Image (tube, rainbow, N blue to C red):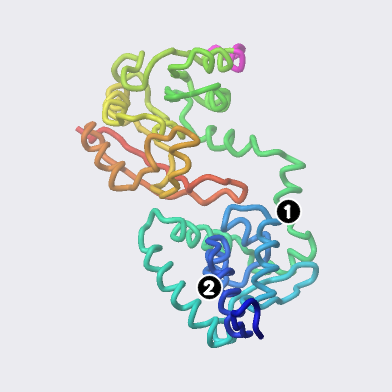
Amino acid sequence: MKRKGIITSPMTTAIFDRLTTLSEPVRVRMLRILAREELAVGEIARVLQTSQPTVSRHLKQLDAGGWVLRRPVGTATYYRVDEASLPEEARSLWELVHEEVEHEAGGASSQYAEDLRRLEGVVGARAGDSEALFRRLGGRWDGMRRELFGEAFVLATLAALLPRSTRIADLGCGTGALLPVLAQAAALVYGVDREQAMLEVAAARTAELPNVILKNGRLDALPLPDAAVDVALCQLVLHHVRELAPVYREAARILAPGGRFVVVDMVAHDREEVRETMGHQHLGFSRARVAELAAEAGLALLSWRALPPDAGAQGPGLFVAVMSPPRA
């Protein structure tokens, strides 16, 4: 067929269509996980941390191009990639793109590596008789439990495991959301933050809690005496702090013998946009970096582990690390 002096053919049109499909990173990430596991729309959305309408829109294009296979299960539809069933030209193009993506995924902090971590969590969450349970409850189990009981009991239960004599410092406490939970179980709770506006909200929240003391101060110069607490907690704060070594030293200083410094923060990642939009000073932390900072402060890293991803979370994955002064 001639068009303005240019000869086109179905073959040239097909290759450009395939190139267009694979030019969208979300669709490439989708194909990569579907080549490993058969997934429903909601599961794909949780792995890719995007909305179900977005997933459905991309699946529609992949389905139209013959990239995915569908399998209805009750009211749900499962999707997968069968590379052997792809047309030869599409398979060759996918192999080229897939090889390049897998090379990039070799970095533990890449988005592709994070996809596989989330995929493992989504697949692992399936119950032994998941299909029967899903048909019966329609995937509403978590929502039903939240409607009945909420979620506050989870933190309260964990806090109740602490010895009643425990003294805790919430470093960078912000508006004090965690302070009432800790106060239920601990003897004394300090909330430390440098922003007075945050502390005013925390003060209103903890006004009826006599074992909560709020302090205005910086994390690199804590307004607490030596050996003042048994647990120092720093939750989703350190990625905002430019100089980390002084904070670790201060945390070590305020710990009593046998105390614990607990850090919850982001695993190392490559999502540069959070540095610009959220003011983050660090793109997460690796286990090696946490161990290095701990050692410089005279602390021993007792444990570091990635936390299971929250299905509704849009940010990078999190870890929890526990450090302590070495035993005498």
Above/below status of 46 relative to 217: below
Residue for point 41% across, 56% down: 110
Q: Judge by depth and name the residue closer to the eye, 157 or 321.
A: 321
Residue 256 lies in what quarter of the image?
Answer: top left
Residue lying furthest front:
5
Q: Three-letter amino acid code at disc 2?
A: Arg
Residue count near mark 2 (Cα–Cα under 10 Å), binned few <14, some 14–19, many ≥20: few
Q: Secondary structure at mark 1?
A: helix
Residue denoted by label 2: 36
Q: Three-letter amino acid code at disc 1?
A: Trp
Q: Secondary structure at mark 2?
A: loop
Total residue callouts: 2
Whether residue 282 appears in magenta in the rendering, the answer is no
Residue stretch rendered in magenta on the structure? 204-210
* Dominant secondary structure (helix, strand or loop) of the stretch shown in magenta: loop
In the shown orientation, is residue 1 left or right of residue 203?
A: right
Residue 97 spot, x, y in % from top left = 46, 72
Above/below status of 288 relative to 188: below
Above/below status of 155 relative to 214: below
* Residue 3 visible at all: yes
In the shown orientation, is residue 66 left or right of residue 280?
A: right
* Spatial separation of the CA atoms under disc 1 and disc 2: 26 Å
Residue for point 38% across, 63% down: 104
Residue for point 43% across, 31% down: 237
Which quarter of the rendering shows the C terminus?
A: top left
Residue for point 64% across, 36% down: 153
Whether residue 208 appears in magenta in the rendering, the answer is yes
Residue 45 lies in what quarter of the image?
Answer: bottom right
In the shown orientation, is residue 127 left or right of residue 169?
A: right
Residue count near mark 1 (Cα–Cα under 10 Å), binned few <14, some 14–19, many ≥20: few
Residue 80 spot, x, y in % from top left = 62, 74
Residue denoted by label 1: 141
